[in-house]
Image: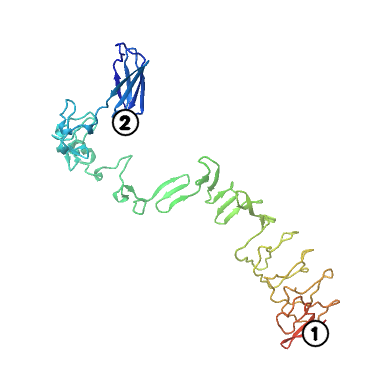
Amino acid sequence: MARSFTIPKLIDEDGLTVINAWCRAFRGDTHALVETQFSDSAGTVSFTALPDNIDCYIISMWGNNTKWFYSEAPPDLSELPGDLDDIADGGTYAKIEVAQLTANRITLSGTDGDLDDVSDGASYSKVLTTDITSGHILLSEVTQSSTYRTTTDSEKSTWNGKPDDMDDIGEGSTYQRVRATSISSGHIQLTSNTVVSGEWYDESGVEIDATHGINIYGTNNALTTRATKAGTIQCYVGSDGAIYAGAGSVILNAAGISIGAGEQKLVFLGDGSYKSYIYGYGTNNRDIRILPSNKVQIAGDVMMGTSYNIWPQTGSNSSLGDTSHYFLKLWVDDIALDNDIVPKTDVTSILGDASHIFHTGYIDKVFRSSAIASQIGTEGAPFAYGYFAFLFASGALTMPVKATTGDPATGEGKIYANTYDNKVRCYADGAWRDLATW
């Protein structure tokens, strides 16, 4: 907010009007510049932005002349003596007694008169006390008009007498009543308490009956699934009661799930693309093929009837398990081979490993390859015991060699060469004994 101040006519010492004098107003408390104006052709200077409650000093300068003016701000109410009791009522506004105010608001109970003294408005009007009971308007006292009216006794006769409640209103041709026992909290109950009987609906092969529920029968496409309301039918219930999909190539009925002729597939999707599938092939699709031929993982057992076999694909190199997926046990009566068990060419093959050991093996002979140097066990993984009726060595028999001083762990019949102690030693009768020294 701001206040105005006007110097009506600025004149010099000779009584002449001063035009275009430079006039500046400063706050009386901080001496800060507030506003700058110039005198007009009548010598009048008008200020419009002076602070409301701060006195201001004004200096006017023209030529070598200077003249001061003082603008006093109107007094604040807090500076006036007394209070509202000392101010007389005006012609337009008057005072309100403190007793008639609560939290700075007029208390209606403190006003003179009542609603009888308030006139009806254009939008809202009063209601007679006799038309109200316990704060509610009595419908029996509503004044009838051409738009709203009650029913006369003669008119009530067409409603089966006085319609005291819904029981007295007859059924209409368009709308009818619902029993109170079928309604709970204003809602129709869909529970066993709902009074229903007989057939509700029977159109286009779909029947809804109170006895046996929803029945779909005898009409193709009585129940369909589509991506959109008018889109291509994906699945449907046929007139024979079966469920069809894939243009009829997949059928679900009492015989099971049927997949049509040709290389029809049971497909397993991964990230939206084919990952694997099962399909029939061969004569009359009597064989089952699983592709792609990476793995077939079985969590439980595979049980086959008598005289049935598991055959690999003709001409293929098929495996049971792989390096990351082992068969825990294989129980068979016999392993019938047309040929030998032969390792893959040019690799070092092992029966078992350090963590998977054959418990017992019965063989007539052990042959080594003539092309490579063969051994039974290694220095890091020796045989604990070996019993041989005869032991043949070509050229020399290589015994264990120890390159540090001292003997290894004791054990009857052990023999070794110690290249550090320069001895061949044998453990017999509970002690290590020298067989040779150098």
- Answer above or below: position of 370 versus 291: below
Mark pair 2, 1: CA separation? 123 Å
Secondary element type, mark 1: strand
- Answer above or below: position of 60 versus 393: above
Residue found at x 30% / y 13%: 13
**Residue 32: percent from left, percent from top:** 36, 28
Q: Earlier in the sequence, mark 2 or mark 1?
A: 2
Position of residue 316 in the picture relative to residue 299 (left or right): right
Name the residue nearer the viewer: 45 or 428: 45
Q: Which residue position holds label 2?
A: 29
Q: Which image quadrant: the C terminus?
A: bottom right
Residue 171 lies in quadrant = top left
Q: Which mark is residue 435?
A: 1
Secondary element type, mark 2: loop
Q: Amino acid at mark 2?
A: Asp
**Residue 286: percent from left, percent from top:** 66, 57
Residue found at x 84% / y 68%: 371
